[in-house]
Image (tube, rainbow, N blue to C red):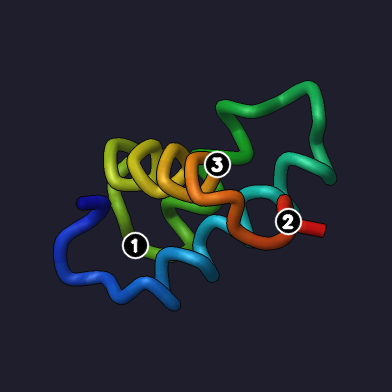
Amino acid sequence: MASKGLTVQQRKSIFSALVAAQDQQPGNVPESKKKVAAEFHISREQLDLIEKEGVDKDWPPLDS
């Protein structure tokens, strides 16, 4: 399970923010991840787990 202590809704919000950040800077994924991890006070490892979970489960905005 991704990121202990975070609800599904929190993880979905983080995932959405990550997708938005990557859309704003398409060529700079590492910087987008760093920004979102700092914004939500989570580790890069947690963010990577959330990203994988979001892609695997087709979370919004990917479901549109």
Kindly identify the residue that appears in the image at 72 percent across and 51 percent down: 62
Q: Earlier in the sequence, mark 2 or mark 1?
A: 1
Whole-percent x and y of residue 9? Answer: 44, 77
Residue identifier under label 2? 63
Residue type at numbered disc 2: Asp
Residue type at numbered disc 3: Val
Q: Is residue 1 above or below residue 44?
A: below
Q: Earlier in the sequence, mark 1 or mark 3?
A: 1
Residue identifier under label 3? 55
Please indicate whether residue 47 sits to the left or right of residue 56 in the image. left
Residue at the extreme left of the image, as rendered: 4
Please indicate whether residue 45 sits to the left or right of residue 12 in the image. left
Q: Is residue 37 above or below residue 6?
A: above
**Which quarter of the image is occupied by the C terminus?**
bottom right
Kindly identify the residue that appears in the image at 43 percent across and 51 percent down: 37
Whole-percent x and y of residue 58? Answer: 60, 50
Kindly identify the residue that appears in the image at 26 percent across and 70 percent down: 6
Residue identifier under label 1? 41
Observer-nearest of 8 and 39: 8
Please indicate whether residue 36 sits to the left or right of residue 4 in the image. right
Q: Earlier in the sequence, mark 3 or mark 2?
A: 3
Whole-percent x and y of residue 52? Answer: 44, 38
